[in-house]
Structures are given as C-alpha cells and as structure tokens.
Amino acid sequence: MTETVLETDGLTKRFGKLTAVDDVSLSVADGEFRSVIGPNGAGKTTTFNLITGALSPSAGVVRFKGEDITDVAPHERVGRGLGRSFQITNVFGGLTVRENVRLAAQSVHSDDINPGEALFRDKNGFDEIAEQTGTVLEQIGLQDRADEHAEALAYGDQRRLELGLVLATDPDLVMLDEPTAGMSSEETQATMNLIDEVLSDRSLMLIEHDIDLVMRVSDRITVLTRGEELASGTPDEIANNEDVRDAYLGGVRE
Amino acid sequence: MVAADFIEQLLNGLTLGMVYVLLAAGLSVIFGVMDVINFSHGELFALGAYFSLSIIAPFGAGTGFWIAIVVAPVAVGLIGAAIERTTVRPLYGRDPLYHILLTFGLVLVINDGIRLIWGTQQRQLAVPEYLSRPVSILGVQVSVYNYFMIVFAALLAVVTWYLLNRTKYGMIIRAGSQDREMVRNVGIDIDQYYTLVFGVGAALAAVAGIVLGGYQNVNTGMGNSVIIPAFVVVVLGGLGSFRGAVFGGLLVGVVQTLMRAYNGSVVATVGDVTLSVPNLEGLTVYLLMIAVLLVKPQGLFGTRGEESESEGEILVGGYGGVLADSTRVRLGGIAVVALALAPLAILFMGDQYYLVVLNEILIWAIFALSLDIVMGYAGLVPLGHTMFYGVGAYTAALVMLHYSQSVFVVLLGAILICAVLAWIVGSLSIRVSGVYFAMITLAFAELLYSAVFKFDFTGGSDGLLGFEAFLGFGTIGASLSNIEFGLLGYELGQQFVFYYLALLIAVLSLLFARRMMNAPFGSVLQSIRESEERAEFIGYDVNRYKRRAFVISGGMAGLAGGLLAVSPSTVIISPDQTLNWIHSGEVIVIALFGGMGTLYGPMIGSGVFFGAEEFLSSYTDQWRLIIGTMFILFVLFVPRGIVSIPSLVAQRLETANNADGPVDMDEPEVRSDD
C-alpha cells in the first residue's frame, strides 16, 4: 500500500440552506492520478476549493501529507506542496512569460531570500530561481516566447503557461480544474500529453466533466452527485457501476 | 431644564441628519447602481444653494424661497444628468478610481465656477419670515425652520423611498444596485437609467443645499464641508442601501450634534469619580465608521457581498512604449542634470520665487511616488494617503521643536513614525478590499485630521510654528536660515541649499523605488496587481506583501511631509495644509495625471500640476477651473497619463498612415521598468 498524499474526512460545505458538499471522504495515494467527475452542481468545484483553501469547510478535515491543513491559508498550502491550476486561465497577463514562471519559482525559494535581498537585489540575479525558470519554460515548450507578454499568447499557450506556473512551484499534488476547458480536441490531446509529460511524477487530482477523457487518463475516479460521493474506483469499476450509470452516465455508455 | 435642552440638541441633530439623508441617498444609490464614487456631490449641493440665492433675489424671501426650492433642484438635476451623459458615461467599466479622479476634477470646475459667478463672500439665503421665527413646544425652543427642514426632508425621503420601492423604475434601479449583470441578463438596458439616477441624486443634493443654506449660510466651502460626512453616512449605512443612508444620516447628524453640545461636560459624579463625555467631537463618527468597516465592511444595511464587485482594470502607464531603455536612462540623466542646473538659470533671471515652486514640486514628487508604490504596483487605492504626508510634517516639526534640529534626525523620525502608522492602519484595513479599503483609509485620515485640532501639542487649529532645521549633526553644520554664501557675485540662500537637498532625496527615492520594483519584493507586488488570486495560489501571502508595500509607501510619504516641515518656505504646519482630504485627492490626481505604475510618471505629474498651477494662476483667478477641465479631459482621453503621450502620438501617426479608423484610447502603454 502506497502512502496517502491527500485525505478528506467528512468534508462538508453549506451555503445557507444548500449543502454543496456533503460528508465527502476521499483519499488520494501518492503518485495517483485521481479524477473527480459529476454533473453540474455536483459539488466538484466546491470540493476543489475546500482542498485548495479558497473556501473553508463547514465541517470536516483536510489532511495533506499526513498533516491537518484545514485551517492553513491557501498560500501556505502551496508552500507545502499543494499546487492548483485555474479553470479560467489566470496568468499575469501584463508580465512576460518568463516573469510569470519566475514568480512561481521565486515563491518556492522565498524563504532563502533575506529581507535586504528581497528589497534590493536584482530579481534575475538568483541562480537557483533562474535555473528552475529555464527548466520549466523548456518543459512547457515556451522558451522561444519567454519575452512576450502572457496576454499576447494564444489560448492554448496560455493554458500551457498556466500549467507552467503550477509546475514551477514544485508541487507534490497538483489540483487541475478542467485544464482542457474550451479547447479543441487537438489542443485537449496536446494538453493531456503535456500533463502526462511534465506532471507524471506528481500526484494529480483532476476536476473534469469530459467523461471520455477521464476514463482514459485516470488511475481512479470519484463520482459526485448532489454534493455526495456516489462511488470511487478504477475507470473500469466506475464504467460498470450501476449507480453511476443510472445517476450520471444515464445509460449512454453501454 | 436638562431634558428640554437635550431634546433641543436632539432636534438640531435630526435637522442636520436630514440634510445628510438627502445627500447620502443620492450618493449611495449612485454608487450602488453605477459604482461611481461621486466627490462632486458636495459641489452639486452647494450649487443648489447658490442657484436659490439668484432665484430668491428678484422675488423676495416670501415667494422666492418656494420657487427656488422647486426650480433650483430641477436645474441642478439637469446639470447632474448632463454631467453623467458627457463625462461619467465613457468611464463605466473602468476602475472606480477613475470616477474619483473625474469627480475630483468636477469639484474644481464647479467650485471655481461658483466663485466666478457668485464671488467668494459668505451669503445669507433668505427664508420666509414665518419660517425663521423661534417656536416653543413643551419648553423646547427651536426655530420653525428646524421643524420645516425635518418634515420637508422626511417627506422627500418618503417620496424617494416610494419611487424606489413601489414603481417599476425604482425596482429596476434597486435590482441594478444588487446585481447589475443580472439585470442586463434579463434583458433590461440598465444603462438608460444611469442618467436618471444621477440627475435625481443631484437634485436631492441641491435640496439639501437649499435647506442647509437657509439654516446656516451659503459659502464656497459648504460642499467641501459636507462631502466627507456624507461619505461616512453612506459607508455606515452600506454602499447602495437607501435604508442605510436614512439610518446613517440621522445617526451621524445626531451623534455629531450631541458630541458638540455635550463636549467634555460632566454626566454624573459617583463618589470621587467624575463621569464625563469624552472630548471626541469630530472624531466619533470616524471611529464609528472604522469600527463598522472592520466588523461589517458592507455597512449596517448593506447586502452586497464583496465578490459581486466587478472592478475594472486600473490603467497603468504599462509597457510597450516607443522609447528604448537606453534612451530612457539617458533622458532621466538629462532631466536630473537639468534640474541640478535650474537654480543657476533662476539666479540669472533674478526671481527666487521659482525656486520655491521647484521645492514644492520636488516634495510632491516624492509624495506622489510613494502613492504609486501602493496604487500603481500593489493595486491598493488609499483615499487617505495625506495622513502620512501630514503626520510626517507634524512629526518633523515636533522633533525640531522638542528634540533635535538636525535635518537627518528629523527626516528619519518622520519616516519611522509614518511607517509605524502605516503598519497599524495597514494591518487593520488591508483585509477589506477595493472601495472599502479606500474608504477606511479616508476615515483614518479624517480621524487624524480631527485629532490634531484637539491636542495642545499639535497646536490645535493654529498648527505648529517656530521650528527650524539644522543641516548637519550635533554642532557640526549650520541652520538653514544662516546659510548664505556668494557665487559670482550672486547671493545664495537657504532656498538653494534646500533645493539641492530635496533634489538629492527625490532622486534617491526614485532609485530606491526602482531598485525595489526590480527586486523579488517588487516583482511580487506587480504580480498582485495583475492577479491577486493567482499570486496567492503560487504561494504568496498577498496581504503581507500589501501591508509591507503600504508601510514603505507610508514611510516615503512621511519623508515628503518631513521635507515640507524642513523647507525654508514653511513657517507653519497646520491641519488644513497637510491633513485635509483634498490633498489625498490631489496626490491621486497627480499620480494618475503623470502615469501610474511607472515611478517617474507621478513625479512628472507633480511638475506639470504645480507648474500649470503657477503658470495659470499668474494669468487668471480661475486656474482651478482650467486645471479641473484638464483633469477631466485627461481621464477621458489619456487615462494612462502624460507618460503615455509619446506612444499615443506614435500610434495616431501610424493609424493615420494606415488609415485604419479611430484609435482606441486605452491601447497606448509605455514601459514600466524605468
């Protein structure tokens, strides 16, 4: 049995009378590619936000690498190795591609920078950060466009940069919120290849509604409906699960 | 008769409160529906009173007053509608900051227009004789006019409430103030209603101006004196909430009046302990406002969540300029050399007054630069930045009076005290964002402004005087006023010495800020400006970075204030000269005028602002009107500031050559890394 990287215990989020996430207990093993699927309003994004810290739960616990992080601030979770991407591309549009990646790399090293350096030393004069920036740029294939402004990139390239930002923070677990939203099938394929290529040595948690995609790439899948966990298992198990077929797949998949 | 006295004061409070209700209702609904922070609301209020003066004059008080109270608000309403159509409308979708700048320009224009037409003398607005008579009810004696004001304003408030709650138009406007996007989505063109809302808001303000004008008097400062309390009311009640405006207005009116009436008086004596009302007149409402903002940022009756705020982009004098990096550095060098030689030119011309102007420009250049660090780089818009300028000046003066005259000690003291103040204010206010942050810093600044009037050690309303700076440490050096030496037969005095000191500090400040923005700390600030959420999720403690930027900015503003106190042209440090909210507005105007997010832009802005002021004021008394008009044109057509003009021109030429149609004004940008 491999180690558990992420665990939620009785995770619940209520907005007034609506219970968006209801007693969800997940456990993601180290190195696993986990996907969370479910129809609209199933609580996928809320679950995602509870794990990254964008929302705080009404009840329940989030454990990351064995530590309780329920009350840990989002930026601190990133520092501990919990990275995330955004559904709507969220990069620093007015800064160069290189600066985008460099900022993410700098965040990992900010403990090594003393206050004097932080205020006065040239941001490009830190060898480790520069090196990591270069590596990530190469991995996401944007080294030739490194000096362009992020907002000048095509949509697909912005998504790549988005992944690059996550990658540069050197996470143990990466939370991906619909990374292929709005992409053509070629772009989707390219992005999934990229994820496979650059993030394969990390644990992944993918929030997605494209079932075919999820079936293809995941180690395990969790299905949510109305905020509750309906089933968890391998793609095969999920595909053959009666409840899931009734509730979500609606008999479309034979 | 203690009870009767109390009721009398309560009535006075309600009377004033009603004026605030009328003012705040418009202000609040305008903000709620359009996200416009309308600083010119106070001037529209004044305009109502001035129109009435002119209307009453030919008819006499008896009938004229009643004609005025109908006609003047309609006239002001029409002006308000025209203002919305021509100036506010093009700015929807931009950051509320631009409305501040625009309406600040309108304040200058309208106020100067009033001076031009009606003069600066205080006037009395004639009310019918039967209204001004005192009347005694149950031993409580106040003027009939008090009752008239309360009843009339209450009537108007009820009518407004009815229109908002019981008519179709009102429903749409209220829905718009809850969630504009949703209203659009259900197929209603909410934009059509903006002119109406702005016009009615202006008309209500005008009514308030007339009734208050009849109660007190009519003067050119009346708009200025009510606008900040009106903002307090709006924030207390909740931005966009009509109920909140009514409640907040009455609360502020009553609290202000009671605190003034019972200021320091003894409430009860229990044994040896004397309980008295604390001497907090003027401070109470701001303390109240800060408390409410900290506990319930959306105000007492506010329903809008912070997340529903759709803030447009702040247009910085960004990147992609037409000048190469090396050209910029060379231009900067040339500018410094030119500034270093300027005094010699002034010497030959023989008019040392220009040196005084240059000194003011340098001080404000540092002040504007300090603002740019938080506004142009960290995306925080403080409406109370002058608190640091003022506290820096006061600290410097106090250090000189009581501790040391050494310029270095004095300036260091100003920087440190302001940095500490910024840390305290920042810790409390950075957790609220956007407009709420702007408002809470405004409240802190007003709190300090009111506080310096209270204390003996700050010299009350007179301010501090009798201090002098000493250039050096201990006994080595010379007092600024003793410095006089000859060069080529010309006499050089303290103004020269101070000029070079200020120039040196200004250049060092710019280099410091530039260095910081190219270092890890500054790079994170820029990422926060680009996307706060993203910065958080690559692992940065956004609030901590903002707070630190605020501390650095506060320290630098304190340095500017300290320099003001050290300056040989400064004889007195007074509350109005340093802590009045107008200066917070001015420094934002200067930073935007020059070009935010460029460091050197705001410094250029300072030069152009004070240069234009000097130049214009030597030709005309209406220079504020011209400068105000300039701001309005700038915010409409050159939102990225003076520094964006080269690329704007370049783009124009290019477009003209390509015959590609009109240029989008928002496009041109210049490099930020210089």
Image (spheres, rainbow, N blue to C red):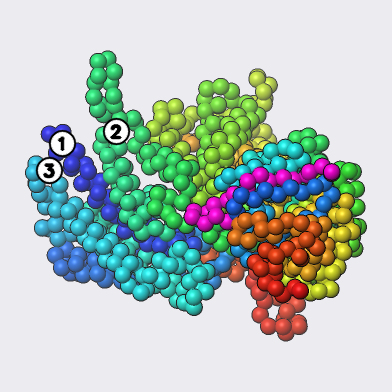
Q: Give the range drawn in magenta.
A: A1-20
Residue sitting at x 84%, y 43%: A1
Q: Which of marks 3 and 2 is nearer the N terminus?
A: 3
Q: Earlier in the sequence, mark 1 or mark 3?
A: 1
- Specify the label residue B140 is tagged with: 3
Foreground disc of the pair 1, 3: 1
Give the amino acid at mark 3. Val
Foreground disc of the pair 1, 2: 1
What residue did someone put label 1 on? B3
- Tell me which corner region of the image, top left, top right, bottom left or bottom right, holds residue A126: top right
Q: Is there one chain holding both mark 1 and mark 2?
A: yes
Percent across and percent down for residue A148 are 82, 63
Q: How far is the residue under mark 1 from the one under mark 2?
A: 17 Å
Which element is circle 2 on? loop
| For residue B569, side relative to residue B117 (left or right) | right
Residue sitting at x 11%, y 49%: B134
Chain containing the residue with disc 1: B
Return the residue nearer the eye: B175 or B222: B175
Percent across and percent down for residue B32 are 44, 61
- Specify the label residue B37 is tagged with: none
Name the outermost residue toward the top.
Answer: B272
What residue did someone put label 2 on? B263
| For residue B463, side relative to residue B150 (left or right) | right
Identify the image quadrant of the N terminus of chain B: top left
Say whether residue A53 is magenta. no
